[in-house]
């Protein structure tokens, strides 16, 4: 059979089917009916073939989605933030062309128009979506070596990340040598409480509290990265080994052993440790009302050294705090003669005759200003107070 030759059938000349290339006719001889069936098959456009080949490099994985997320909200959100940071490089219009969500596992695959836009989207790791920080990663089918031939594999360094609340240069979020592992977290700690504790040392660039996929409850550990990488070792040294409720924190670089802070960082470390002591007091499960209220930030250690000043403060506290109920005792630990500030120095303990008075005092005193400082008032365990343990 020759390509382009005519077949004579019942006195008629039939031209070869023009939709079938001649080479296929030579390789696979077909009857006219078979040729008609073959010509009816849809042919994939070149554009569709190109999209399929680049798809692995145009998709990003988005994890940690809130339960309210859907395909439309995710598409609109990422198209908007891509426009805000200047990440759209394929012309006007939305950067997102498709979204697939796995609602059970709370993640999505977001497909961009171009490889370059997908790489720019990687800079959005840690962005807040519907009140929750989400992870932005490459999908498991991403082929780095192949992707390198298709377009840029890193975000554009000139993206305006500040326009969406991210820190320039924070691409990668929780990756890298400065990622911190925080273990031994009490399960009742909320995400907000943990962030507040960690942010004692400065703002976070990325944070991830690991949760059970089925229940959504905390697994008791988290990862974080600070915006200022210089405080990484300070935070690890200050937080590691601290008791929180019935747990002891383990805080270290996720990929390395412990590293001691440098000498010039010691003053920062000391200040941070003082702040952590306040956070500990706040985060203890002290929501159960007791007859004892502990005040922090109400007095300064220097005010307690002289006997006359000390007695005056005691009288002032007794007079002010009696407004909430009948006081049994007011205890204000004083510095030791050698200047030691251990043993609860800087705190004020108010013991009331009943829980009602203590509750009124906690509500009325918490957040008030004493000497320009905002007072923190929490319930204190009665058995510890009775034993003279004021460090809790």
Image: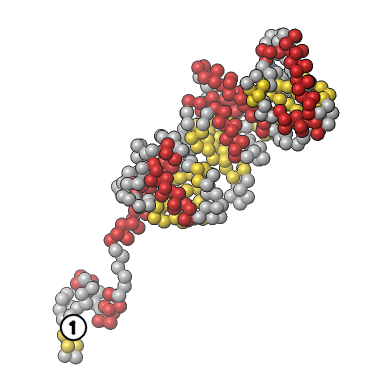
How far across and how far down the image is residue 42, in percent? 31, 70
> Quick one: 280 or 151, which is closer to the camera?
280
Looking at the picture, how far across and down is residue 226, in whole percent? 50, 31
User: Residue sitting at 65 percent across and 24 percent down?
Assistant: 369
- Is 241 rendered above or below residue 21? above
Q: What colouring style does the render use?
A: secondary structure
Give the residue drawn at x 35%, y 37%: 157
Q: Which residue is mark 1?
A: 14
Where, quadrant-wise, is the N terminus in this rendering? bottom left
The answer to which quarter of the image holds residue 321 is top right
State the image coordinates of residue 333 (x, y, percent, origin top left): 74, 17
The residue at the point 29 percent across, 63 percent down is 45
From the viewer's perspective, is 364 left or right of 108? right
Q: Identify whether 337 is placed above or below 385.
A: above
The reply to whether residue 322 is in sight is yes
Residue 113 falls left or right of residue 213: left
Is residue 45 left or right of 256 when viewed as pictured? left
């Amino acid at each position: 059979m020759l390509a382009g030759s005519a077949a004579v059938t019942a006195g008629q000349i039939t031209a070869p089917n023009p939709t079938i290339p001649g080479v296929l006719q030579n390789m696979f001889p077909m009857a006219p009916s078979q040729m008609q069936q073959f010509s009816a098959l849809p042919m994939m456009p070149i554009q569709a073939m190109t999209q399929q080949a680049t798809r692995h490099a145009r998709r990003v994985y988005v994890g940690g989605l809130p339960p309210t997320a859907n395909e439309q909200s995710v598409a609109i959100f990422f198209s908007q933030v891509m426009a805000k940071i200047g990440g759209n490089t394929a012309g006007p219009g939305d950067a997102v062309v498709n979204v697939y969500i796995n609602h059970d596992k709370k993640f999505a695959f977001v497909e961009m128009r171009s490889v370059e836009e997908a790489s720019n989207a990687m800079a959005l790791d840690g962005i807040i979506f519907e009140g929750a920080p989400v992870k932005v990663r490459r999908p498991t089918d991403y082929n780095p070596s192949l992707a390198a031939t298709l377009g840029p594999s890193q975000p554009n360094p000139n993206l305006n990340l500040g326009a969406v609340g991210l820190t320039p240069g924070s691409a990668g979020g929780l990756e890298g040598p400065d990622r911190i592992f925080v273990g031994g977290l009490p399960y009742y700690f909320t995400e907000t409480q943990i962030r507040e504790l960690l942010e004692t040392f400065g703002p976070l660039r990325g944070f991830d509290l690991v949760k059970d996929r089925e229940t959504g409850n905390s697994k008791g550990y988290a990862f974080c990265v600070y915006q200022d990488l210089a405080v990484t070792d300070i935070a690890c040294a200050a937080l590691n080994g601290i008791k929180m409720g019935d747990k002891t924190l383990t805080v270290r670089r996720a990929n390395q052993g412990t590293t001691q802070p440098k000498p010039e960082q010691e003053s920062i470390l000391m200040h941070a440790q003082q702040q952590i002591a306040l956070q500990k007091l706040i985060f203890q499960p002290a929501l159960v009302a007791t007859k004892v209220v502990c005040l922090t930030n109400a007095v300064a250690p220097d005010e307690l050294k002289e006997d006359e000043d000390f007695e005056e403060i005691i009288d002032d506290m007794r007079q002010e705090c009696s407004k909430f109920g009948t006081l049994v005792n007011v205890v204000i630990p004083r510095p030791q003669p050698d200047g030691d500030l251990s043993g609860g120095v800087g705190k004020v303990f108010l013991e009331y005759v009943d829980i009602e008075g203590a509750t009124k005092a906690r509500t009325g005193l918490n957040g008030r200003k004493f000497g320009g400082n905002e007072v923190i008032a929490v319930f204190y365990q009665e058995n510890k107070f009775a034993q003279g343990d004021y460090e809790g």
